[in-house]
Amino acid sequence: NAGVTQTPKFQVLKTGQSMTLQCAQDMNHEYMSWYRQDPGMGLRLIHYSVGAGITDQGEVPNGYNVSRSTTEDFPLRLLSAAPSQTSVYFCASSIWVNTGELFFGEGSRLTVL
Amino acid sequence: TQLLEQSPQFLSIQEGENLTVYCNSSSVFSSLQWYRQEPGEGPVLLVTVVTGGEVKKLKRLTFQFGDARKDSSLHITAAQPGDTGLYLCAGSNTGNQFYFGTGTSLTVIP
C-alpha cells in the first residue's frame, strides 16, 4: 500500500531558487492538501484541492503555487525560495472533508539558505 | 490565525501516570479529530468526534467533544512509553479546510 508519496524527503535551496515538491496518492481521494509544520505552530494549510482542476488557498498561500491536473497528483511549487520557507512540508489526502480521515505523506524537509 | 489552541504545549510524565490534553477554540466545528505524530513521520488519525458531548474510548485513550462543539479533550490513563509523540487536534467545517491545533508534545519516561 503506497498511500501518499512525497518526494523529495530532503532538499536544500538557495534564496531565490525555485523547486517543486511532488505528491501522489493511489487511494482515489478527491481532496488533497499541503501543510507546512513549524515548531510550536502545528500544521498550517497552504493550498488544497477538492478535485482535479480545482484548487484554493489555505491559511499561508503566499510564495507557493499548486495545480491539480489529475486526481492522483498535487505538486507544490516554490516560486522564489526564501529563508522563511524553511520548514517541513506534508501532503495529505482525504476521501471527503467534513469527517474524513486525512492520510499524510512522510514529509519533505526543506532548508532555504 | 490559529483557530485551535492546545494545552499544554509540552508534557513530560512518568510511566503509569494519567494526563489530559486540551484543545480549545472560539469557533464551532462540524467534526474534530485527534492525530498522533512520531518523529520523521506524518500524523496518523486516532479518532473523529462529530456530536457535541460525544465521548469515544480507544483502549487507554478517552476523547471528548465539547457540548458546543468548540473544544475537545484527550485523556490518557496509565501512560506508557509507546504513547510518546506529538498529539494534534484538527477541526473541520463546511469550508473544505482542516484547521490544526498547535500540538502537544508528550514524553512518557519509563
Image (cartoon, rainbow, N blue to C red):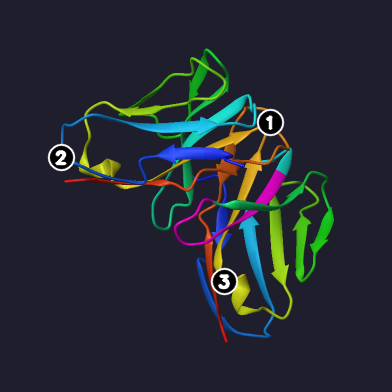
User: Which residue appears at 52% of the width and 51% of the height?
Assistant: B42
Q: Which residue is mark 2?
A: A14
The kind of residue tagged 1 is Ile
Task: Give the extent of the magenta segment.
Answer: B32-42
Q: Position of residue A42 (x, y in %)?
A: 48, 52
Residue B45 visible in the displayed image: yes
Q: Chain of mark 2?
A: A
Q: Position of residue B46 (x, y in %)?
A: 69, 55
The kind of residue tagged 3 is Thr
User: Which residue appears at 48% of the width and 48% of the height?
Assistant: A106
Disc 2 residue crowd, few under 14, some 14–19, many 20+, Cα 10 Å: few
Q: Which residue is mark 1?
A: A95
Residue B1 visible in the displayed image: no
For this orientation, the residue located farthest to the front is A1
Quadrant (top left, top right, bottom left, bottom right) of the N terminus of chain A: top right
Choose top left, top right, bottom left or bottom right for residue B108.
bottom right
Does B98 appear above or below A107?
above
Tell me how far mark 3 sits from mark 2, CA to CA.
35 Å
Does A86 appear above or below A64?
below
Same chain for mark 3 and mark 1? The answer is: no
Q: Chain of mark 3?
A: B
Q: Which residue is mark 3?
A: B84
Horizontal side of B73 relative to B90 (left or right) equals right
Task: Choose the circle earlier in sequence order: 2 or 1.
Answer: 2
